[in-house]
Image (tube, helix red, strand yellow):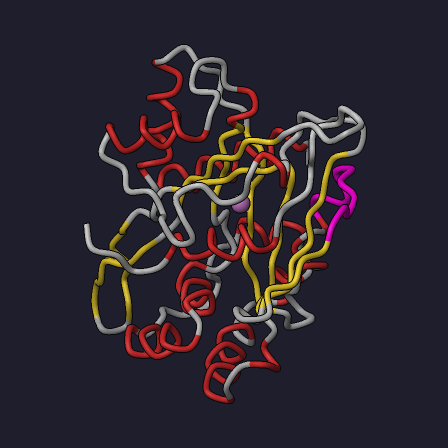
Amino acid sequence: MKTQEIFDRLWNDYSNQNPSAKKIKQLFENEGENVINDHIAFRTYNDPRINVDVLSKIFIKAGYVEKGQYHFEEKKLFAKHYELENDPMAPRIFISELQLEKCSDYLQFKVKEKIDEITDSVLNSDEIIFSGTSWSKPSYEVYTKLREESEYAAWLYVYGFRTNHFTVSVTHLKKLNAMEKVNEFLKSNGFIINSSGGEIKGTPSELLEQSSIMADIVKVDFEEGPYAIPACYYEFAKRYKDENGQLYSGFIAKSADKIFESTNFYEK
Ligand code: NI
C-alpha cells in the first residue's frame, strides 16, 4: 500500500471520530496555513501477536526504517519511531507498547481475553492498524478498573488499533510559527490544552517543542450501555536544527510521557 493511501485511510477514521482535529485543520487552513503532518502515533500491548514490531510491518513494507527507541518506566511503556528513508517531509511513525508483564494479573487477564478474540486473518494482515477493536464490546466496569492502573491500557481496551493522534508540524507553519502562538490560537477557539508538565513540552535547546489538546470526549457503546469517554487528540510539534543544520527528527521521552496524558479524563 502506498504511504499516501495509508495516511488518508487513517486520517478519515481519526478525523470522523474526533471532530476537533478536522475543525483545527480547517482553522489553520483558514489562516492560509498548509498543514503538514509531523507524526502519527499508535498504542498497543507487548503481546507478541500485536506488539510494536507487528504494527510497524505495513510501514516497513512502505519503506520506513526504525530510527529511535524510548522507555517510559512509570507508565510501563516502550516505544519505537520510524522514518521514511529519503523523504524528510514524510510523517514519522511513533508506536508504543504496554509492558504487560509489569502489570497486575487482573489487567493481563482482561487484556489477553480481548487479544484472544482477534481472528488470525486480522493478526496475519498488515491492515491490523486499521482494525480498531476486532474484539467483543468492552465492559465499562472493566474499563474503569483498568483506568485506575493504566489509563493507556484502558484507552487501548476500548479503541484498539487506530491513530491515537496526528500532529501538526508547527515547523512548517508560516504565521503561527511558534508554540505560544499556536496554543493561544487554539485556546481562543475554545480548545483545552494539555497542561501536564506545562502547556509546552520540551525547549528549543532540546530541539523539539510539543503541545496537544485534550482528547475529544466521545460516546462509546459498552456492554452496560453508552458512556462518554476521552478518545483521540491532536498534537503540535516544532522542531529545531541541530549544530549540523539538520532538523532534529527524534522524540524526547520526558515530553512524550506528558503528551500521553492527553487522553486522561478532564472536566470541560
Ligand atoms: Ni506525538
Q: Residue furthest top?
A: 32
Pick whichever, 17 or 234, lies toward us.
Answer: 234
Report how many numbered discs are placed on residues in the image: 0
Q: Residue at x 72, y 59 (%)?
A: 53
Residue 123, compared with residue 252, is above or below; it is below
Q: Nearer the viewer, residue 241 or 43?
A: 241
| Residue 231 in the image, given as x and y percentages of width and height | 36, 52
Looking at the picture, how far across and down is residue 31, in whole percent? 36, 13
Q: Is residue 65 magenta?
A: yes
Measured as percent of width and height from the top left, residue 112 is found at 54, 79
Q: Is residue 197 above or below residue 88?
A: below
Instruction: Describe residue 161's horizontal placement relative to residue 233 as left or right.
Output: right
What segment is highlighted magenta in the picture? 58-68
Within the magenta stretch, is there residue 92? Answer: no
| Residue that lies at the very extreme toward the bottom in this rendered image | 105
In the visual, does 38 lie left or right of 218? right
Residue situated in front as seen by the camera: 149 or 246: 246
Which residue is pictured at 75% across the width and 40% down the height?
64
Image-quadrant location for residue 115: bottom right
- Which residue shows up at 62% across the image and 37% down it? 205
Q: In the picture shown, does residue 140 fall above or below 71?
A: below
Please state the horizontal and vertical placement of residue 261, each as a whole percent of the image: 42, 57
Image quarter for residue 118? bottom right
Left or right: residue 80 versus residue 198 is right
Quarter of the picture holding the N terminus? top right
Residue 152 versus residue 252 in the image, above or below: below
Residue at left 47%, top 55%? 258
- Identify the image quadrant of residue 186: top left
